[in-house]
Image (tube, coloured by chain):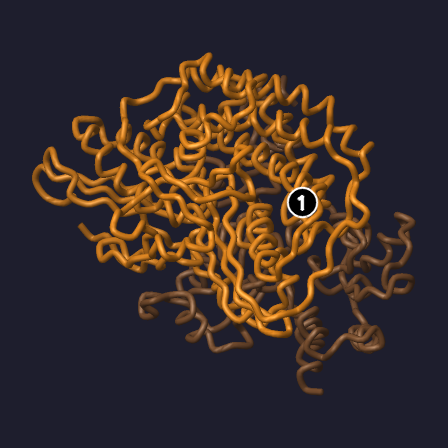
Chain colours: A brown, B orange
Amino acid sequence: MSSESKRKPVHKPKIGVFKFASCDGCQLSLLDAEDELLGVAAAVDIAYFPEASRAMLKGPYDIGLVEGSITTHHDAQRIQEVRRQCKALITIGACATAGGIQALRNWKDVDEFVRIVYATPQYINTLKLSTPIAEHVPVDFELRGCPINKYQLIELITATLAGRKPNIPSYSVCIECKRKGNVCIAVAGGIACLGPVTQAGCGALCPSYDRGCYGCYGPMETPNTESLTSQFRILGQSDAQVSRAFRGFNAWAWQFRKASEECERT
Amino acid sequence: MSGRGGRTIRVDTLARVEGEGALYIKMAGERVSDVKLKIYEPPRFFEALLRGRHFSEAPDITARICGICPIAYQMSAVHAMERALGIRVDPAVRLLRRLFYCGEWMESHTLHVYMLHAPDFLGYQDVIALAGDHRAVVEKALRLKKIGNRIVQLLGGREIHPISAAVGGFYKMPTKQQLRDLVDDLEWALEASLGTVRWTAGLQFPHFEQDYEFVALRHAEEYPFNEGRLVSNRGLDIDPAEYEDHFVELQVKHSNALHSMMRGRGSYLVGPLARFNLNFDKLPEVARKAAVDVGLRPPVRNIFRSIVVRAVELVFACAEALRAIHEYEPPATPRVEAPNRRAVGQAITEAPRGILYHRYALDENGLIVTAKIVPPTSQNQKRIEDDLREYAAQLVAWPIEEATWKCEQAVRSYDPCISCATHFLKVVVEREDN
């Protein structure tokens, strides 16, 4: 490839990284891929990535990676422009795919939230809801996680450029635990664990560290949240505790949302 | 733009910082008439959404304030809760927390030194361009960063938003062998850090000495991470619980942002320079010698030299990590169980960018009633503007593109983390129509 590129300039796919309301952690995953970073940079043109570069090239982009949720009027407009500029739009992380932890405002009076944090509330321009990108524009792929798994990100970029389906499973954390040979902390240890309803991707981290999964990767495909809720109750969890468990970093994902709201109703 | 003789330095999107900010400097002739570091990062209301959550959730939730320094949030949260609940942790837990922080400092400082800040000194847009001409330097940096991340990964499960830190200890402790496996890498990292000190010391620094009030933790025996009194070079010496008696957040008309200030005193500086100047005697010999060998002695008053101080702190973090690994004996239990009770607790720890204050009030069920978080970048924000006012005045004769880049470099010297600061900063919705 390098000898070819010496002969004539090859069109390298352009990637843009766009941030909305978030912690920057998911885009940092790209810089945290220490072994792959220079390889990725050789294969693609990282054309817009303000966290890493002051050179900001204009679109259109072959791939847009979008981090963060929509929480302001301005951002609701900006995502429309980002969508127009990106051939493939990929959302990365729980904020972009489910609204993030900041979606806890969605059950509260946001004006009160503003007053709690800010002395002069009138300066704050914010929407009542924190919403995922897909509620605003069509999304080509949603990569889960709080934070995302950097190897999944590289697989996703590679697959998108190759025009194939990315190998990213949608089964539960339980499968990862079984593969690692973990003893089930929920069954054997009586620990409340969201693993049975949470999508894999982290490598069953929390159960491997003797604690219950807290749902970073959001709901798995067709999760049985009702069954898990009754299991949590058997373990002695109160309705408030079960509700809080579902109301984490993927609280606004509809399956978790429904589960937490059902706890509040009982 | 703004009329005869006036010009504006304008950076709509500040690059190589965490989060979203903009910079505007207006100059009228020889004079700097206005400086605004604007934050347009949307607020996420962490202090509000923590209300009603259990104290045990605070380390996980507050980590999400910042993907670059999640451990800092976890450490300030667990210490504040432990102070509230009257818990004393096992000495092995204390040691591992220092090791955990070493990993974060290594990862964060290496990221900043090589990937965010060095390109400014050498005239590159980013680290990828830097790698084009200096591949070996960048490869070394990536390996150093990875070793920091390896520590975090071992103790916390993953680099970003680790999952093992808990009020009272850790969910799971590593074995001695697992820690010993890090030693070879850390010995390499120590050498690489010493090389980083020499390399950064060889960069060109603008002449820009300022008279700062430096604020950092100070501990009787150690270079500070998690404990100590809060001190300054102008006589401040308080317990972290007294923080709010001495520091206040004020709204400033021109910037629409709350600025953290010392009551009756004004702006102050937190971060590597402050730590180094106030705790030079607590650095291990190897780090102190590395600093002195390149002519770096306290007080360092040039913010551009913070890149060298970060490198010295890298040396410290490697040496301290090795010490912690050698001393580690696994405790009987990974953590002390904490009872629910009505209480208030505050803590300050040293995030890579400076002091991070947390305060929580809990109810009888252990649920958070109020939370207050003051991140380092919001504390430095006023100081950044003060610096720019002085610094831009030196650049009035420069071509605008170069002056702009130099001002960006000055801001990046602080390693600002705007994602962090936005819990508290006013969001600016204002047009610059000059």
B261 relative to A106, above or below: above
Q: Is residue B332 left or right of residue B157?
A: right
Place residue B253 in its image quadrant.
Answer: bottom left
Q: Nearer the viewer, residue B161 or B429?
A: B161
The answer to whether one can see residue A61 in this image is yes
Left or right, residue B421 beside residue B393: right
User: In this figure, what is the number of numbered marks?
Assistant: 1
SS category of the residue bearing label 1: helix
Q: Quadrant of residue A251?
A: bottom right
Amino acid identity at mark 1: Leu
Asked whether B107 or A148 is in front, the reply is: B107
The residue pinned by badge 1 equals: A153
> Between B267 and B195, which is closer to the camera in this rendering?
B267
- Mark 1, chain letter? A
Quadrant of the drawing holding the N terminus of chain B: top left
Provide residue B203's location: percent of width, then percent of height.
Answer: 40, 17
User: What residue is shown at x 57% (from left), y 61% (from top)?
Assistant: B84
Q: Residue furthest bottom?
A: A266
Q: Residue furthest front?
A: B220
Residue B241, horizontal then vertical, whole percent: 46, 55
Q: Is residue B360 above or below residue A157?
A: below
Tell me what residue is drawn at x 62 percent, y 32 percent.
Answer: A37
Whole-percent x and y of residue B20? 42, 49
Residue in front for this viewpoint, A140 or B347: B347
Q: Is residue B249 above or below residue A45?
A: below
